[in-house]
Image (spheres, rainbow, N blue to C red):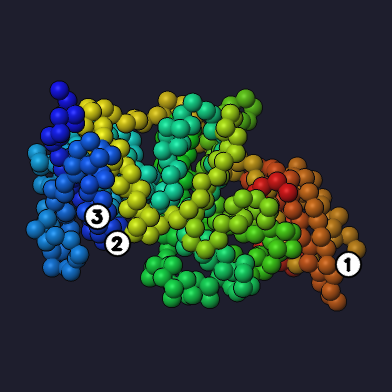
Amino acid sequence: MPAEKSGAAKPIRVALLGCGTVGTEVVRLLTDQAGELTQRIGAPVELAGIAVRRLNKERDVPKELLTTDAAGLVTSDDVDVVVEVIGGIEPTRTWLLDALRSGKSVVTANKALLAEHAADLFEAADASGADLYFEAAVAGAIPLLRPLRESLAGDRITRVMGIVNGTTNFILSAMDATGAGYGETLEEASRLGYAEADPTADVDGFDAASKAAILASLAFHTRVTAADVHREGIAQVSAADIAAAKGLGRTVKLLAICERVVSDGTESVAVRVHPAMIPRSHPLASVNGAFNAVFVEADAAGEMMFYGRGAGGAPTASAVLGDLVAVARNKVVSGRGPRESAYAALPVQPMGNTPTRYHISLDVADKPGVLSQVAAVFAEHDVSIAAVRQEGRTEDASLVIVTHAASDAALRSTVDKIGGLPVVREVVSVMRVEGAE
């Protein structure tokens, strides 16, 4: 008789790597919900050990479980599942590869590691028959990766667009609400705890780019790494940009955009992270503060949006525990979760070939013929103008142009040439535009 039906199921032994904010919450949930987890899984879950960098740091966890020997813990015969919330690339990559190669399933929240080395981890998991789960790596508590990986496995996803970084969304939402500039809003975000002491990974788009690589890999059955993602941050977004967006009935968000692109009958994948103006009628426009949301478009399912808290100890731990329940159930019934799906192997489209739209603000001389000279440059680069607004002053004027879709390279070349026109005093700002009016 299978052990789970005999009432004497063998415990699932878990090694935890990392005991910071998320790790401490994982321990708390494992303790507080022990009875319910046993019922859901069919076997009790026990902590075999917790690997930390320093033993003398005060933590609200059983001290007898702490160890600095992560390498020994992940390969111990007494461990069934390794949960990793320590972050970083090395030595974390080595530890997880060792765990997978020894047949231990892995649950990780490490977006940077997955965005660079997912192929290595999946290959190790496949070789040993272990599971690799990573729901917490992209959007905290939001159930997102499993729907892409499992629920929509029978559909064809065409586009994934989302707000996947809470720090930048908090900053841009505050700028939109108050009219303040980027610098002062970043300071306020730091004071309130929404931005790290060094916010580079967030505000320069590195965090979102890692998540975009993971989303694109799952959505399009293609290996995509962080290096494949075009990345721009929000440091150059000004109060004037926010005001211009408002004037167009739009708001500015840092978006991770993953989409299928067909050119001359050849399909490829475009993956990018950058600020963009979106209509206030778009579902993502109302996502404010530190919340995350991802908008998915699929052939059969149509449009859907996943929304919730994308970071924080408890929300992230919730996603980790969900994965832990899944891999533990698989251990109990000798099953396996989904493996890597990279059969499509689509090429990644260079940003220059990716179709986008621009909002361009120019400071121009206030005299006849300016618009015709500017429009001639657009025509020369085969870029169509969707809307134009001109406001005159005593000696100069502002000219705002919104384009139709064109290759990003053509749009960039257009802007560069316009900047050299004698009638253009300054290219004040350039921002991409997403979403139908």
Residue 139 vs 104, above or below: the answer is below
Judging depth in this view, the residue of 294 and 266 nearest the camera is 294
Q: Is label 3 in a helix, a strand or a loop?
A: helix
Q: Is label 1 in a helix, a strand or a loop?
A: loop
Q: Which residue is mark 3?
A: 32
Residue 146: image quadrant is top left
Q: Which residue is mark 1?
A: 367
Mark 1 touching mark 2, by CB under 8 A?
A: no
Q: Is label 2 in a helix, a strand or a loop?
A: helix
Judging depth in this view, the residue of 37 and 116 nearest the camera is 37
Q: Which residue is mark 2?
A: 21
Q: CA distance from mark 1 to mark 2?
A: 60 Å
Residue 247 position within the rendered picture, expressed as x and y whole percent measured from the top left: 74, 63
Q: CA distance from mark 1 to mark 3?
A: 72 Å
User: Mark 2 vs mark 3: which is more N-terminal?
Assistant: 2
User: Mark 1 vs mark 3: which is more N-terminal?
Assistant: 3
Instruction: Name the residue type under label 1.
Output: Lys
Judging depth in this view, the residue of 234 and 194 nearest the camera is 194
Residue 225 position within the rendered picture, expressed as x and y whole percent measured from the top left: 41, 42
Q: Residue at x 77, y 45 (%)?
A: 384
Question: Is 362 placed left or right of 307 in the picture?
Answer: right
Q: Residue at x 46, y 29 (%)?
A: 153
Circle 1 or circle 3, nearest the eye: 3
Q: CA distance from mark 2 to mark 3?
A: 17 Å
| Crowd band around label 1 with a 10 angstrom C-alpha radius: few (<14), some (14–19), many (20+) | few
